[in-house]
Amino acid sequence: MLPHNYDKFPEISFRDTGAAWRGWETLTAHLRAAIQAGRSQHPHFVVAVECYPGLHDGEITSALKHGLQADHWLATRDIFRSEPEIEALVAPYLGGDDPVFGFLSPLVVEDFIDPEKLAALRRRVNSLSGSVVIYGTGAALCAAPDLLVYADMPRWEGQLRQRRGEVDNLGTRNRGLKASLQYKRSFFVDWRVCDRLKQQILGRWDYLLDTTLPRDPKLVTGECLRQSLEAAARQPFRVVPFFDPAPWGGQWMREVCGLDPEPANFGWCFDCVPEENSLRLRFGEISIEIPALNLIFHSPKQILGAAVYDRFGPEFPIRFDLLDTMSGGNLSLQVHPPADYARESFGLAYTQDESYYLLDAGPAAAVYLGLRPEISADDLFDALEGAQARDEPFPAEEFVSRWPAKKHDHFLIPAGTIHCSGAESMVLEISATPYIFTFKLWDWGRLGLDGAPRPINLRRGRNSLVESRDTDWARAELVNQIEPLGSGPGWREERTGLHPLEFIETRRHWFTGPVPHDTQGTLNVLNLVEGAEASVESPQSSFPPFIVHYAETFIVPAAVGPYTIRPHGAAMGTECATLKAFVRTDS
């Protein structure tokens, strides 16, 4: 077993230590002084505290009211439309009774606000003297603030708060609603709405208020934050991974990544999903935790490259995550929607093409991939429907090809292909990033972590399955499509995928010495799949050496250009390997 050196809390350090504050007393004292200084120039002084959904409003408003000592306090909740109006507004995007799927909303914050109430609030703000604080989502729209504070939090923390029943969805009081339904509303509506506003105003933030940890707030100036994001966009970095149990979860990550011994298992590690992961920026003794998505919004072309940005906009198109079934069970038998179905049904610009790379494997490891040659789609779904109706086991191996899997195998999975990882596998999943669009066809008769059956979606699965993806096709097109590409002193390169139907390309490098890489103007995402640790370095010394450890995923922005990777520390004298993914831009 390799050393347990996986870094669960990576961060980027900066020298500027005078632009960040920690704790309510300290940061509100700073803001109060800034307000007082501003009032010497503008006796009528407006502070807008714009908020991302899912904050602990009670803690924040109590601390700010006490610490800022403003003359007037206004809340945007008072100018939102009524809850019945908001429920009617968002209903078309929530898929009716569907427990999982909806349609990506084009709504904006202004749609949630009553125009007459907004006009009245603006008149009131203009009539008031002294200092005025406007708090809540939409605060930046209520006036031309003299000071703009953005209270932020990563989506993953919001999901945990939903599971604990602590927060509401945008414009409603619905805490206590089933967490999966709160998440669905956030995914299809709330996050889309508030991210659109965030992109508009990020360049105007005077301060960012980090509310990720309850009762441990941090504050950083907007100028310092933007400078740090610009620096981050020109060097390798990691986002903060998060781990989650699963009905099929295993034990490998607990040992290798040094995780909490209390949960029964860990099935997921999301270690490169910037839309949900956080990014830690250290200023002296203070570590600010922000949504990694803020970096993509601020510096999209530097991170993605011009061609990828032109294709996807400010969206990170590559996802790396870990799926642990070691001492666990099979993943659900599943299929992802083809691009046209995803676009028409959910408003997605692209779909979840993916692949399974085996970081590790037990003797019985296997991947289910492709229909058996003699099986038709009708045969498959008749049997699935029968098993579900009669609550009987489904004989998966009679219908789906089962491939023995070993460490460093790579299975390609274009959308429309039936698949799942079997037990005793440690999978590095490399995919496009539409997140939740997996149609479960069979879940091996087990219950979810909440004690209820997980949603099965045979109708959508039937509409998505490509029947011709059978055993022979999988063997010829999807299983270990390894192609040697080149070599140099102490290294060799192989192409491992993905399939031509998928827009992601992957390259594996084996090395005992420095390996030359070049982003060639496009985003690179890598994982150290063999070796204890490696050093990522700049031939021009444009960034300091960046150390990565076994199983860690890291991002090399397009703006980096040339870089090298070599064994480091405990890996010196051994052979290491990275798997690199990037978007094909020549098609």
Image: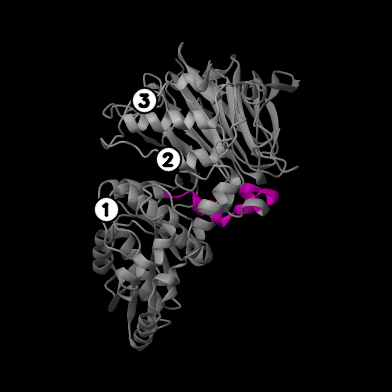
Quadrant of the frame with the C terminus = top right
Q: At label 1, which amino acid type do we have?
A: Leu
Residue, disc 1: 177
What x and y, as percent, mark residue 549? Answer: 50, 27
Sequence-wise, which precedes: disc 3 or disc 2?
3
Q: CA distance from mark 3 to mark 2?
A: 31 Å
Question: Magenta residues?
Answer: 288-309
Is 516 placed above or below 33 here?
A: above
Q: In what element is the residue under mark 2?
A: loop
Please name whichever residue, 564 or 170, is drawn nearer the observer in this view of the structure: 170
| Residue lying farthest to the bottom in this orientation | 127
Disc with the residue nearer the chain's start (3 vs 1):
1
Q: In the image, which disc is placed on residue 254?
A: 3
SS state under label 3: helix
Mark 1 or mark 2, earlier in chain: 1
Query: Where's residue 126, x and y in %?
Result: 38, 86
The residue identified by callout 2 is 457
- Magenta span: predominant SS is helix
Q: Residue at (40%, 24%) from the top-left corner? A: 394
Task: Report the quarter where the N terminus lies.
Answer: top left
- Return the x and y of residue 152 as percentages of the image width and height: 40, 57
Q: Are marks 1 and 2 in contact (CB under 8 Å)?
A: no
What's under tag 3, amino acid-wise? Arg
Q: Pointer 3: residues within 10 angstroms few (<14), some, or many (20+)? A: some
